[in-house]
């Protein structure tokens, strides 16, 4: 029986974040300094890292993904009264809910989601994610940051990238009776055309 090597210590920062703590402004400001910076390059962020990385690999995909997720979470959480991390709310689901608010045009959201999903590198992905996160913050739509961190880490593998894109697309275009987006209606119409 093999023993799994732990990948991180304790819970991720966003999992334990309490929006009512007084030090939040300082902490989130420190994390936002990581936007566009390499992992480990912002000393104020060091205390928030939970990833376990080998000494010979200080800038692993794991640590870079956590760094990006921390910085994006800090952008998302800024000026919010509720925690913007919610387990189980994938990126596609969160953006679909954003689309349903009518705060932005569906075409603009579709375009931004497409740009994000077709990013060819993790750095490009994070750059596009920042725009989506800013829009999600404007409507207080939470997101699963634990899953997002995994997605960013997996983006380095072409196989994982394809799986992540597929999951995002499934979440974003999922039809349900409460879904008022054009995408849902189009899927409903398509499904009825092929029904026996």
Image: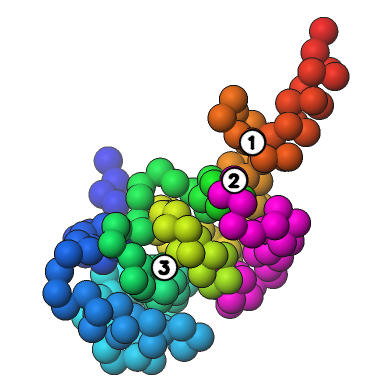
Mark 1 — residue?
Answer: 180
Quick check: is 116 in the magenta stretch? Answer: yes
Dominant secondary structure of the magenta stretch?
helix
Q: Quadrant of the C terminus?
A: top right
Q: Earlier in the sequence, mark 1 or mark 2?
A: 2
Left or right side of 2 for 145: right
Quick check: is 142 in the magenta stretch? Answer: no
Q: CA distance from mark 3 to mark 2?
A: 19 Å
Left or right side of 69 for 30: left
- Badge 1 density bin: few <14, some 14–19, many ≥20, Cα 10 Å: some
Local secondary structure at mark 2: helix
Point 14% across, 74% down: residue: 22
Whether residue 150 is visible = no
Mark 3 — residue?
Answer: 76
Left or right side of 173 for 98: left
Q: Nearer the viewer, mark 1 or mark 3?
A: 1
**Magenta span:** 100-129
Q: Position of residue 51 (x, y in %)?
A: 31, 69
Q: Earlier in the sequence, mark 3 or mark 2?
A: 3
- Badge 3 density bin: few <14, some 14–19, many ≥20, Cα 10 Å: many
98 above or below 176? below
Q: Position of residue 23 (x, y in %)?
A: 16, 78
Mark 2 — residue?
Answer: 100
Q: Earlier in the sequence, mark 1 or mark 3?
A: 3
The figure's colour scheme reads: rainbow
């Amino acid at each position: 029986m093999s023993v799994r090597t732990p990948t991180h210590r304790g819970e991720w920062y966003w999992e334990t974040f309490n929006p009512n703590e007084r030090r939040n402004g300082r902490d989130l400001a420190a994390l936002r300094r990581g936007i566009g910076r390499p992992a480990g390059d912002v000393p104020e962020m060091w205390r928030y890292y939970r990833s376990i990385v080998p000494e010979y690999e200080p800038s692993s995909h794991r640590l870079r993904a956590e760094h990006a997720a921390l910085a994006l979470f800090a952008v998302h959480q800024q000026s919010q009264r509720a925690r913007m991390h919610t387990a189980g709310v994938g990126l596609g689901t969160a953006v679909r809910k954003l689309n349903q608010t009518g705060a932005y045009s569906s075409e603009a959201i579709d375009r931004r989601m497409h740009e994000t999903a077709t990013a060819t590198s993790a750095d490009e992905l994070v750059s596009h994610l920042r725009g989506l996160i800013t829009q999600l913050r404007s409507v207080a739509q939470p997101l699963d940051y634990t899953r997002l961190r995994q997605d960013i880490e997996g983006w380095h593998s072409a196989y994982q990238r394809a799986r992540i894109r597929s999951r995002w697309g499934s979440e974003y275009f999922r039809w349900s009776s409460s879904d008022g987006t054009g995408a849902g209606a189009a899927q409903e119409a398509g499904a009825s055309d092929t029904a026996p």
